[in-house]
C-alpha cells in the first residue's frame, strides 16, 4: 500500500483518483483534512502545502499539481525531500491555445473591434499585418515557452525567446542571460512571459523592461503575478508605451473586486485559466514519480530547490 496525501483548493482528488488507481491499484490517497497519521504518508501530491506539513515526517517525494512550484513556498517545505513539478501534454496544449488566441487577438486587432462592437462603431479598419512582420518575444524557453515559440513560429510569426542558458529551437531566435534581455525586449511587438517565479525573475515585468519594448507593444503574462510590477504596467498603458495587456496571473488571486486592473480599458483579465494539468494524462508522470521515490531514484522533472525551478 502506498499512502498519498492530496492538498489543493483548485484541484479535486475525485478527478485524480480514478486515473491514478488505474495505474497504481494499491494507492491509498486521502485529502489532507482526512489524514489522521501524517507520519504514515509516503508521498504528497499538492498545489500548496497542507497544514502542518512538518508532521509528514516520512515523505519520500513532494509532487506539485502544477508546472510551477513557487506556490509551494520552497523554503518552508521539509528539507531533503525531493520535489517534482508537472509536465503534462494536455497542460502544454492548453498553454499553446491560450497564447495563440491572445497573440492573434492583438495581431488581428480584435481588441479594437471588440470595443467598436460595444460602442456601435465606427466601421474602420487597418489592413492586417503579415505574421512575419509581427515580432513575438517569449521570456522563458522551458517546457511551455519552447513549445509556444515553435507553435507561433510555425504559424509564421517572427519569434524570439530568452532563457538563462543557451537554447536552440528551429525557426526561433534565442537569447540567454540578463545582458540579452534588452535585445529581446527591443524586438518584441508582443511579449509573452513564461518564466517560473524565482528570486531572480520576480518583478521582471517592470518599467525598465517596458521602456525597452517598442512603443505601442503588448504584454501577455501567463507566468506568475509577482513577475509584474503592477503600477509600472498601469503607467506604461496610460502613457501609450504599451497598448494592451492580457493577464492571467495576479499577485493576489482571486483579483480583488476593487483592483484597478478591472477598470483599465486596455487590460484583458482571465482568472488563471491559461492551462492546467489533465489528471487523465498527467497521472502517468505522478505514478512514475511515486515508484521512483519509493525506489529512492531521482524524480522525473525534479526541481532544483536552490535554483527555484
Ligand atoms: P520550465 O520548463 O522550468 O522553464 C523555465 C524557463 O525559464 C527555462 O527556459 C529557464 O531557462 C527560464 N528561466 C528561469 N530562470 C531564468 C532567469 N533567471 N533568466 C532567464 N531565463 C530563466 O517551466 P515551464 O514548464 O515552461 O513553466 C513556466 C512557468 O509557467 C511556470 O513556472 C508557471 O509559473 C507558469 N505556468 C502558468 C500557468 C497558467 O495557467 N497561467 C500554467 C502552467 C505554468 P533555462 O532553459 O536556461 O533553464
Ligand atoms: C499553473 O499555474 C501551473 O503552474 O501549472
Image (cartoon, rainbow, N blue to C red):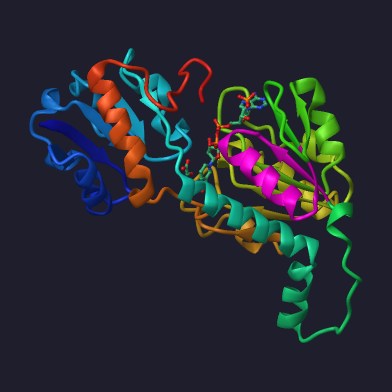
Residue beneath the point at 33% across and 40% down = 284
Instruction: Answer whether residue 137 is magenta in the image.
Output: yes
The image quadrant in which ligand 1 is located: top right
Q: Nearer the viewer, residue 149 or 218?
A: 149
Classify 209 as above or below 74. below
Query: Can I make out residue 14 in this image?
Result: yes
Q: Nearer the viewer, residue 217 or 238?
A: 217
Q: Which residue lies most toward the top here? A: 80
Rendered location of residue 261, percent (x, y): 63, 56
Rendering coords of residue 137 (x, y %): 76, 42
Is residue 202 placed above or below 273 in the rendered structure?
above
Q: Nearer the viewer, residue 46 or 232?
A: 46
The answer to which quarter of the image holds residue 226 is top right
Residue displayed at 85% across by 51% down: 239
- Quadrant of the drawing holding the N terminus: top left
Apparent side of residue 305 relative to residue 188 in the rendered image (left or right) = left
308 horizontally vs 154: left or right:
left
- The x, y position of residue 270, in whole percent, is 56, 58
- Residue 198 higher or lower than 210, as above or below: above
Residue 206 position (above or below residue 110): above
Residue 10 visible at all: no
Q: Is residue 278 magenta?
A: no
- Count of residue discs: 0
- Residue 192 image position (x, y, % from top left): 69, 45
* Residue lying at 26% horizontally and 49% vertically, measured from the top left: 19
Give me the residue at 83% from left, 49% from top.
189
- Span colored in magenta: 135-160
Amino acid at each position: 500500500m502506498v499512502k498519498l496525501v492530496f492538498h489543493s483548493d483548485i484541484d479535486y482528488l475525485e478527478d485524480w483518483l480514478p486515473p491514478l488507481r488505474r495505474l497504481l491499484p494499491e494507492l491509498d490517497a486521502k485529502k489532507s483534512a482526512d489524514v489522521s497519521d501524517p507520519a504514515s504518508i509516503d508521498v504528497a501530491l499538492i498545489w500548496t502545502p497542507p497544514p502542518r506539513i512538518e508532521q509528514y515526517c516520512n515523505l519520500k517525494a513532494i509532487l506539485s499539481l502544477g508546472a510551477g512550484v513557487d506556490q509551494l513556498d520552497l523554503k518552508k517545505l521539509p528539507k531533503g525531500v525531493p520535489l517534482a513539478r508537472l509536465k503534462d501534454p494536455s497542460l502544454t496544449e492548453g498553454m499553446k491555445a491560450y497564447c495563440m488566441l491572445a497573440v492573434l487577438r492583438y495581431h488581428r486587432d480584435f481588441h479594437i473591434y471588440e470595443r467598436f462592437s460595444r460602442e456601435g462603431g465606427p466601421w474602420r479598419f487597418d489592413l492586417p499585418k503579415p505574421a512575419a512582420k509581427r515580432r513575438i518575444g517569449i521570456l522563458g524557453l522551458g517546457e511551455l515557452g519552447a513549445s509556444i515559440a515553435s507553435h507561433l513560429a510555425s504559424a509564421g510569426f517572427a519569434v524570439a525567446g530568452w532563457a538563462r542558458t543557451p537554447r536552440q529551437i528551429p525557426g526561433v531566435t534565442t537569447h540567454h542571460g540578463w545582458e540579452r534581455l534588452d535585445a529581446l525586449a527591443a524586438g518584441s511587438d508582443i511579449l509573452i512571459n513564461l518564466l517560473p517565479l524565482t528570486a531572480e525573475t520576480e518583478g521582471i515585468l517592470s518599467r525598465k523592461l517596458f521602456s525597452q519594448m517598442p512603443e505601442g507593444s503588448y504584454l501577455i503574462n501567463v507566468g506568475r503575478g509577482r513577475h509584474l510590477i503592477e503600477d509600472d504596467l498601469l503607467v506604461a498603458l496610460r502613457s501609450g508605451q504599451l497598448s494592451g495587456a492580457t493577464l492571467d496571473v495576479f499577485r493576489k488571486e482571486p483579483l480583488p473586486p476593487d483592483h484597478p486592473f478591472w477598470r483599465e480599458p486596455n487590460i484583458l483579465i482571465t482568472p488563471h485559466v491559461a492551462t492546467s494539468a489533465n489528471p487523465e494524462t498527467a497521472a502517468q508522470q505522478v505514478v512514475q514519480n511515486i515508484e521512483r521515490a519509493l525506489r529512492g531514484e531521482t524524480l522525473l522533472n525534479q526541481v532544483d530547490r536552490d535554483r527555484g525551478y
